[in-house]
Image (spheres, rainbow, N blue to C red):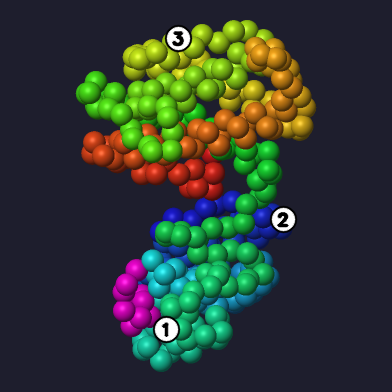
Amino acid sequence: MAAATTVGDPAGHRGDMFADFVDTLADVLDDHETNGEELALRLHFSRFHFDRMIKSVAGEPPAAFRRRILLERAAYRMITTRAPLIDIAVEAGYGSHEAFTRAFKQAYGVAPATWRRKPGHIQIAAPSDVHFHPPGSIRLPARDKVTPMELLTKMVEHHVWLTGEMVRLAERLTDEQLDEEIELNVDEDRQSIRSLVSRLIGQMGMWNAAMATRDYDWSVEDHESLASMRQRLATEGPTYLAHVRDVADNGRVDDTFVDALCEPAEVFTYGGMIAHVLTFAAHRRTLVVLAFAKHGVEELGWGDPMRWVAEPA
């Protein structure tokens, strides 16, 4: 089990030591024979100074900290597995179902069986804000908070990356599979993997052209080859992402630009344009990954950005 190594504690050495403690605890979390004395020795402290220092930073003694993390993981296991409660109790370091039930009820307010039927929040309130982070780590609070603008940029970064992965995986398919019609009874347009991926790239290219006040060549999307897609994405993806980063870094989401290529010309905000791209791209990406799965290509799952935006760069 790995732990993140960023910590928001401003106390210099104590903060570094606390990060080392969390890393060490993550390594031995399932070794219930490792006690507080051994943890202190690993970090080159006496047990007295170790307990006092961890409590001063975390707001709870090391033993209580560990029990809370194990209970949070147990709560996660209850939601995501069908393992018997006794197995989850043993994994959490409890020798009996009764002991586990008492500890769980004290932390969550209800017995484990009741909580499993109607689960609530996994995290138990703690002064340090350090918690078990699914699927298998302990996460320290980030030193820097992610701003809405940074989140927006991460979503676009994910979109550009995922489009590139779609082009790469499309090379495994035959022309017949690439061009097979994706049937929808609510859309008159006839789509295929080829046309959708080409449009994903073209959508960024179209807005790049609009912001540069130049024409966009729609004909390039007419039965576009994968080689052409790779070449266009290498230009349009980074260019579009650079626009988004500039807008986010300089707080220009509400700034407007004129799309002179529309008939008649229209005025858009940068934020509206980005929202438009991500919304329609999400629909197209979902159709592509479902079509991929039909042909046995399942590496991208649903193409969900949830983990992408949650992980450090």
What's drawn in magenta, residue-wise? 81-91
**From the viewer's perspective, is the residue at label 3 or at label 2 nearer?**
3
Measured Cα–Cα span from mark 1 to mark 3? 61 Å
**From the viewer's perspective, is the residue at label 2 or at label 1 nearer?**
1
Horizontal relation, residue 247 to residue 276: left or right: right
Q: Amino acid at mark 1?
A: Ala
Please rate how many residues cluster around mark 2, counting C-alpha atoms within 10 Å: few if below 14, some from 14 to 19, many from 20: few
Query: Is the residue 155 above or below the residue 23 in the image?
Result: above
Residue 249's x, y, as percent?
A: 71, 31
Which residue position holds label 2? 10
What residue is shown at x 33% (from left), y 33% (from top)? 182
Which residue position holds label 1? 113
Measured Cα–Cα span from mark 3 to mark 2? 57 Å
Q: Quadrant of the N terminus?
A: bottom left
Which residue position holds label 3? 219
Q: Quadrant of the C terminus?
A: top right
Horizontal relation, residue 299 to residue 264: left or right: left
90 part of magenta stretch? yes
Q: Quick check: can you spot residue 235?
A: yes
Query: Is the residue 301 above or below the residue 168 in the image?
Result: below
What residue is shown at x 46% (from left), y 23% (from top)? 199
Could you say which quadrant of the image residue 134 lies in? bottom left
Label 3: element kind: helix
